[in-house]
Amino acid sequence: MKGAPVEAQVAYNSLLERLNASERENRSLNRTIKLLERTKELYNINIEAQLTRSRSVVDKLTTAKAMAEASNHAKSEFLAKMSHEFRTPLHAIIGMTKIAIASDDDARKEECLVKVQEASHHLLSIINDILDISNMESDNIKFNDVEFDFRELVEKAFEELKAYIDEKQHSYTISIDKALPPVMIGDDVRFFQAISNILHNAIKFTWRGGHIRFNAKLGNAPNTMQIEIIDNGIGIPPDRFQSLFNAFEQIDGGQTTKEGGSGLGLTIANRIIDKMGGTISIESALGEWSTFTINMPLRYPGEKSDKPMYEDTGYILVVDDVEINREIVAVILEDSGIPLDFAENGQEAVDMFKAEPERYNMILMDLRMPVMDGYEATRTIRALEGGIGADIPIIAVTANVSREDIEMCIEAGMNRHIGKPVDFDLLLEVLSDYLNLSVKS
């Protein structure tokens, strides 16, 4: 009987060992179950994340597709509208020219020519807008810093739009805070373009007999300025504010069709102000008024440099390979009494100036000519022995009007740039600046 307790002890120990082994297996099984559950959880999370990402990608692709379709639709509408906008002035130019040629009545001829001129200016403005927006979209527009008189710039913008203001029977006021410096630094050409485009839009969408206000003052932040252009016109729906600045989009087809134009003016203005470090914001009450507010950095010089002046007239050397272009300049300057010489290419101009440098006080230089172009001719004249061509004003008069072309002119040694078709008043203004003349436009 003594062996019984021993056997019981052995049985107990064996049972205990099996229980411990079973517990270890249970723990292992529990760990496995928890691992599987965690794996499932992570798998579900990963699947959800993948689905979320997939849905996000699909949403983005759908949005991009919708935007692309909207953009293509807008561009198609724009191109269709531009086809009409191009054909309208071209029809007027061709029709009025035929009538003028066929007519023996001088008054009728003059009436036709006035209408041809108006249609030509309208066509040129459309072409310029399209070229500008194309250059801006490809980031080919560069900005230069020059000193300019701010009040003169604003008054010139209103003066150029005066015929349109009078046609709409509008009145206007200009208020410029005396705290603003009279002379500022920036790209005056582009700034003028932005201001003019916003003003033109205000005039265009204001009821006949309306009022346009231009206010300029110091901005709330240091070294900033604020410009407000306010009209009492048709107003803008709040949900269309941003659409005003989108290329190829116009918010009111009926009114725009009635008034005409490319519809790119505000897009160009917004991009110019953005490039100059500023912003344009809009406030409006539909059917009552709109306010366009420009906030931008204010930069101004310590001193204003004097413009070069020349005491006597001398001759102007007109360099252009196209005869009709030389004739146009001659007609513009016919009443000024300024004597002119003509050269048909850059080499001829160099030879004429080199032979009698004291004869000339200015050169009007075309760029693209046979034998020697305007760039090379200018560099050659500037490099003539004894510095005889170092100081004479050389003005580019050319159909090459991009910012890159203007910069190339300056780099070659030219003083200024005038685009073709030649603006009569601008050419006379340049003569007045450099030759100290008082010429009538």
Image (spheres, rainbow, N blue to C red):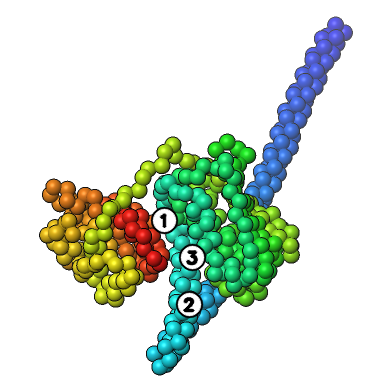
Query: Residue 93 occupies which quadrant of the picture?
Result: bottom left
Instruction: Find the residue positioned furthest to the right.
Output: 1
Q: Which residue is mark 2?
A: 119
> Where residue 152 appears, x then y in whole percent?
49, 53
- Going by the numbered disc 1, the residue's amino acid type is Asn
> Where residue 6 appears, x then y in whole percent?
82, 9
> Can the viewer see residue 228 in this picture?
yes
Q: Which residue is mark 1?
A: 140
Distance, label 3 to label 2, CA atoms, is: 16 Å
Q: Is residue 299 above or below residue 237?
A: above
> Where residue 34 appears, x then y in whole percent?
74, 33
Distance, label 2 to label 1, CA atoms, is: 29 Å
Secondary structure under tag 3 reads helix
Q: Nearer the viewer, mark 3 or mark 2?
A: 2
- Going by the numbered disc 3, the residue's amino acid type is Asp
- Going by the numbered disc 2, the residue's amino acid type is Ala
Instruction: Find the residue positioned furthest to the top.
Output: 2
> Can the viewer see residue 94 in this picture?
no
Q: Which residue is mark 3?
A: 129
Q: What residue is drawn where x is 29% and y is 67%?
A: 337
Query: Residue 409 occupies which quadrant of the picture?
Result: bottom left
Distance, label 1 to label 3, CA atoms, is: 14 Å
For the N terminus, the image quarter is top right
